[in-house]
Structure formats: C-alpha cells, structure tokens
Amino acid sequence: MKWLTYILVASIAVFAPRALSAQESNGEKIAEYKAPEIGTRLEYVGWTCTVEEVAGLRTLCRLGDGSAITLVGWLEIDGDLPDSGYFQDRLFFYFGGTQKVYTEQTGLNQAELDKIEAIWPLKVGKKTRYRVRVFAGLQFDVRASVEAIEQLDLGGQIIETFVIKLDSRLRGDSSQQNFLRRLWYSPELAVIVKEEFEWTQGPRRGRKFDSDLLSAQLPDGTPTFAFAPKPDGDATQD
C-alpha cells in the first residue's frame, strides 16, 4: 500500500526526552497526536511491527511475517488483518451455534476517520462515536472516551498515560457479540504502551486478550528501552 507522501516533519523521534509529555491547556492536561518515527520497531506481547509509512493519523506497520496493518490514531485497524495471530484471533465471530467465521478486513470511511480524529488532542472526559465495518454488512458502533490519566510503572520506568476506553457493539447480530478495549497512550513515546481487550457479550463473553509494549528500537537499530522481560517461553508472535 502506497500513500501520497505525507510525513509529519515536525514530529520528534518517538523516544525523545520529556518534550513529548502531556501539555497544559486551560489548566487541563492534553496529549496531541504524534506518530512514531518511520523505521521504529515496536515489540508487543503477541506481535511485533516496524513503522513503514505515516500519513496523518494513519500508520502503516509491517509485521514480522511480512503482512502489514494500518493503524488509525493507534485506535483501530483499517484494511486487511493478518491471516493469523494476535489480531485475527481476537476477532472471530460465532454464527449458528458453533460455526466460526473470521473477519478478514475492517474498514473506516472518511466520515468515521474524521470522528476518530476528533478525539485528538486527548483530554480526560473527551468522547467520540464512530462505526467500523467488518464483514457481511456488519458494523461495530464504537463509543470512545478518555477516562483518566494514569502513571504506569513499566519495568521501573514511570510513564504518564491517557486511558482510552473503546466500547464496541456489533450491529445486526442478535447474539450481541460486543467487546471492550482499553488503551494506555503515552504522549512521551507516541504509542500505545498497554492494551486490554475483553468480549463482554455473546459466546466469547469473558475471553481476554491483553498486550503490553515490551521493547522498541529506533530506525538505526538502537535499543531505546525495554519495559519488561519477555514472558517465559517467548510467547510473542510476529
């Protein structure tokens, strides 16, 4: 996938010093959107990717198996999902009892992209609603809200994060296969450092898929931080 070249020239390297921390606006903390630097390698529990292209809120990240995901504001994936692994394992649906149907693509039109953009800059109490297409004409209604500012202790480093709640409800499905996500966005690092995903209704109710940022490397390969040791047995998947 190639886009019209639009690089955030003013963006500082994703792991620059405190200049990327939350700013004050009318006495309240806010976080402007910033993209990771092209070439940055991010390792999460369950997946690893390298940033290849940046266009506004859209970040193309190449996975270890050669597939790619397009992250919109680090909140949603727009386009093809990997054939297997962390992302698609979360998003399969039950129809007719035990039948499993996988979604292979998610989609956001321009109106929905604009609604996602509206939540930036992040500020506690800010909200937006948008729809994500999946398959067979089904759509998720997503209610996004900035819940809180939290200090996370990640491997001995204290990181300030904005907690974003995403309540996703599947339209056109009588079994109400809904899920809830929480994302912890670090304005210092310009990435999500923690995610919690849980099915809240339907046949998979109670199933959880969580992922934390483990490490990152700048484009030249320089390690910049490692928040936590890898799980025993190297449970990550590219």
Image: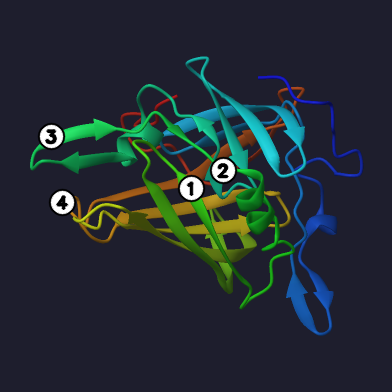
Query: Mark 4 is on which residue type?
Result: Pro
> Residue at label 4?
203
Q: CA distance from mark 3 to mark 1?
A: 23 Å
Q: Residue at x 55, y 66 (%)?
A: 163
Query: Mark 1 is on which residue type?
Result: Val
Label 4: element kind: loop
**From the image, which quarter does the N terminus lie in?**
top right
In the rendered view, tell whether residue 171 sits above or below residue 4. Answer: below
> Residue at label 2?
108
Q: Which quadrant of the figure has residue 117?
A: bottom right
Give the class, few, some or many, for how many residues have Cα within 10 Å of label 4's Cα (few <14, many ≥20): some
Contact (Cβ within 8 Å) of mark 3 with mark 1: no
Q: Residue at x 13, y 34 (%)?
A: 99
> Residue at label 1?
132
Q: CA distance from mark 2 to mark 4?
A: 26 Å
Give the class, few, some or many, for how many residues have Cα within 10 Å of label 3's Cα (few <14, many ≥20): few
